[in-house]
Image (cartoon, rainbow, N blue to C red):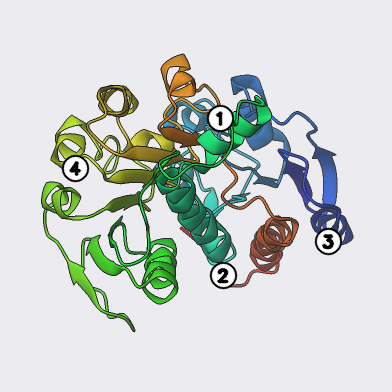
Amino acid sequence: MSRIFITRPLPDVVLNAARSLFDVVEVRQNTLPLIEKELLASLRDYDAVLPTLGDQYSADIFQNVSSPRCQLLANFGVGYNHIDVAAANLAGVAVTNTPGAVTDATADIGVMLMLMSARRAAEGERLMRANAWAGWHPTQMLGLHMTGKKVGVVGMGRIGQAIAHRCHFGFGMEVFYFSRSEKILNYPAKRVGDLCDLAAQVDFLVAAVPGGIETRHIFDERVLAAMQSHTHLINISRGDVVEELALISALQAGSIGGAGLDVYEYEPKVPKELIELENVTLLPHLGTAALEVRTAMGLMAIDNLKAFFAGKVLPNVV
């Protein structure tokens, strides 16, 4: 049986499925990313690895293992910017991911963050927990009404389209988007060719782009400066697509309405300045944190492993 290394604890259903098919030598119980010596050992000692976010399989790692035993990195997650795919392929290692399984859960979190940020839900919850609520009055904690507003979705892939769908059909919002190509959709949506132009005309700006060099800091000081003073920035993609220091400055100055974040530039580190701000909602990367979703992701990764070792076409190769 093929020797498999799983780099994080996974739902029991997933582990049972893996053990029924493979020699699962180790399920690493440490929830932090692999360190260098673990990355190197994983390529040397196993036929395949099931890694996830934060396991940095960089070009240097592959260069330091001349003839890897590992033939497949079956990534747990749709994002794979932590894996240098070109370097992996050059070393004879295939890479797969788990698209589709994460779409609805991540879109739900995006809409939740829009509501929480606009309606000051996290701020209100802190007020209640501090036992500092003096009672209702007509001008208390006034936020931004979301229904009927304009949303700008940056990155119109599966997740971006799912967010736009919810915004249009659920909240009657006008949909605008920034994408490399025109999309055929079952609801009205206008493509805007310049990110700053998009930022200037919407009430919610939602990051739904993949991570990587091309998207690093695309939400920079220039884009934040283009946003209207009431507009909220939402990020459910990758932390480093937003220039965190520029966002902190905009929030401190009150030049944008607020922000809702599920990811961070130097995750899990969250700047003290962000934590101290009232006009930002912070979540601990909950995008796919539902048991059935994480189970579906894991089983999809197992399907990729199963296909590979059966000599079949990989369902989700990247």
Residue 220 x %, y %: 22, 33
Q: Mark 2 to mark 3: distance in Å?
A: 17 Å
Q: Which residue is mark 1?
A: 65
Q: Nearer the viewer, mark 1 or mark 4?
A: 4
Circle 1: residue type: Val
Q: Nearer the viewer, mark 4 or mark 3?
A: 4
The residue identified by callout 4 is 227
Q: Badge 3 local density, few (<14 within 10 Å), some, or many (20+)?
A: some
Residue denoted by label 3: 17
In space, the residues marked 2 and 4 are separated at their CA atoms by 40 Å
Q: Earlier in the sequence, mark 1 or mark 2?
A: 1
- Alpha carbon separation for disc pair 1 and 2: 27 Å
Mark 2 is on which residue type? Pro
Task: Find numbered disc 2 in the image and state the secondary structure of the residue it sits on.
Answer: loop
Q: Amino acid at mark 4?
A: Met
Q: Position of residue 256 (x, y in %)?
A: 26, 36
**Tag 1–tag 4 contact (CB < 8 Å):** no
Instruction: Name the amino acid type tagged 3.
Output: Ala
Q: Residue at x 64, y 28 (%)?
A: 34
Residue at 27%, 34% in the rendered image: 217
Provide the residue designation for mark 2: 315
Q: How many marks?
A: 4
